């Protein structure tokens, strides 16, 4: 991975999480990455609405969400030419190996289980964004 | 626009003024050219040797000071690169920062919840997402019947737990006998199939107990950060439930200046 950029100026991330406290904590962790603009979505449907109106460089999503879950969201995004190569990080309570394998097979870039460590998330985001 | 007739006194004065003005300008330009030629003929002005050496010495001193500063910075950088202490300390600070933020978010969620359901949803989300609890039961207090009864269960489909008579016995009694929120170092009230009984208090009023039964597969034990959160939950989730309970049963009364002033003794 290239280590060229000093910060994420001009880049944006979409955080898709139905739990407000968890969403706040992911946003809090991402705020440590200078310049990264973060947009929040309550669930998969809200995410699709936001993805249709703006371009994101990274999507971070939970799996268990009402209406449209995180795995369906990954599938939809990978079928979309515009989001075929955009990094998608899953943050979930589902810790079983088969869940991880399924998400990665659908096209998720990385899979992180809760409870999260902010440093782990920051490091991972930097890595996938090439910072 | 009016026209002065040729030869009028005003026009004559204006012309005289302009002649004088341009003549002075011409004279000034001539003087400047002459001075320029004189200075060119003189060549570069000699600089006194002592002035030069003082300036050079000053610069030399400044350079030496900067070099010292650079060396100092190089030593500091080498020390940072050469040991893991700096990285370790930074990670520690990041973890502490995140832990405090987690507690802030959890506390604010409990106090902004308007209904008992919202408080219990927050409790579930914090236990699940922040602590890593995979299965738990919230036992609420029925004060009239003096019992604890299962109200919410996470991680299993059915509410199969029996009511518990108060005062409780066994591990549950350890925490319900506290008479106030659980603090780090107090008994966990662990028992058969239970990692912890977390009492939820509002002051000294017991409003419920979170029976923590199992971690998520990826979580192995409580850590220091968890204990801080559990302490906060024991105190603030209880207040949140009591507040939401009161709100649910309160008669709606409009805000009135007279009543508000009486409340603050104004």
Image (cartoon, rainbow, N blue to C red):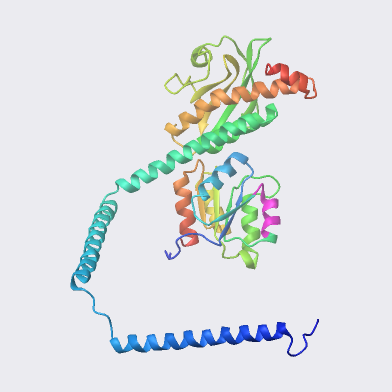
> Residue at the spot x=52%, y=34% of the render?
B103
B196 part of magenta stretch:
no
Is residue B240 visible in the rendered structure shown here?
A: yes
* B243 shown above or below B94: above
Number of on-image labels: 0
* A95 shown above or below B131: below
In x, y percent, where is residue B152?
64, 27
Give the image quarter of residue B44.
bottom left
In front here: B206 or B172?
B206
* B163 shown above or below A91: above
Q: Which residues are magenta?
A: A41-51
Dominant SS type (magenta): helix
Q: Is residue B255 left or right of residue B80?
A: right
In front here: B36 or A81?
B36
> Residue at the spot x=56%, y=36% of the render?
B105
In front here: B15 or A31?
B15
In x, y percent, where is residue A102?
56, 53
Q: Quadrant of the N terminus of chain A?
A: bottom left
In x, y percent, where is residue A9?
53, 61
A50 part of magenta stretch:
yes
Is residue B154 visible in the rendered structure shown here?
A: no
> Residue at the spot x=39%, y=88% of the render?
B34
Give the image quarter of residue B113.
top right
In x, y percent, where is residue B66?
26, 60
> Residue at the spot x=59%, y=10% of the render?
B166
């Amino acid at each position: 991975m290239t280590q060229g950029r000093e910060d994420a100026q001009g880049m944006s991330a979409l955080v898709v999480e139905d739990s407000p406290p968890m969403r706040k904590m992911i946003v809090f962790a991402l705020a440590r990455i200078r310049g990264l603009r973060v947009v929040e979505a309550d669930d998969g449907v809200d995410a699709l609405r936001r993805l249709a109106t703006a371009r994101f460089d990274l999507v971070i999503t939970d799996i268990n969400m009402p209406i449209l879950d995180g795995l369906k969201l990954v599938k939809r995004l990978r079928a979309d030419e515009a989001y075929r190569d955009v990094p998608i990080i899953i943050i979930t309570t589902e810790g079983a190996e088969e869940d991880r394998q399924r998400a990665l097979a659908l096209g998720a870039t990385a899979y992180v289980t809760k409870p999260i460590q902010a440093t782990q998330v920051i490091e991972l985001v930097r890595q996938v964004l090439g910072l | 626009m009016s026209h002065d007739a040729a030869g009028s006194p005003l026009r004559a004065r204006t012309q005289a003024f302009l002649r004088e003005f341009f003549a002075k300008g011409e004279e000034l330009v001539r003087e400047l050219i002459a001075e320029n030629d004189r200075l060119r003929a003189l060549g570069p002005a000699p600089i006194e040797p002592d002035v030069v050496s003082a300036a050079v010495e000053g610069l030399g001193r400044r350079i030496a000071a900067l070099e010292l500063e650079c060396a100092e910075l190089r030593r500091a950088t080498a020390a940072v690169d050469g040991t893991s202490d700096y990285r370790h300390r930074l990670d520690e600070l990041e973890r502490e920062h995140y832990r405090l933020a987690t507690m802030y978010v959890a506390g604010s969620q409990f106090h902004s919840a308007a209904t008992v359901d919202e408080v219990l949803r927050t409790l579930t989300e914090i236990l699940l997402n922040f602590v890593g609890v995979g299965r738990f039961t919230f036992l609420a207090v029925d004060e009239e019947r003096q019992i604890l009864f299962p109200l919410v269960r996470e991680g299993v489909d059915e509410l199969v737990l029996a009511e518990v008579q108060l005062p409780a016995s066994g591990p549950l009694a350890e925490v319900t006998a506290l008479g106030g929120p659980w603090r780090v170092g107090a008994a966990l009230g662990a028992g058969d199939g239970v990692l912890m009984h977390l009492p939820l208090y509002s002051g000294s009023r017991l409003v419920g107990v979170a029976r923590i039964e199992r971690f998520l597969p990826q979580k192995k034990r409580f850590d220091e950060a968890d204990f801080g959160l559990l302490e906060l939950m024991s105190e603030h989730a209880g207040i949140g439930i009591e507040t939401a309970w009161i709100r649910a049963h309160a008669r709606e009364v409009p805000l009135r200046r007279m009543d508000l002033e009486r409340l603050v003794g104004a």
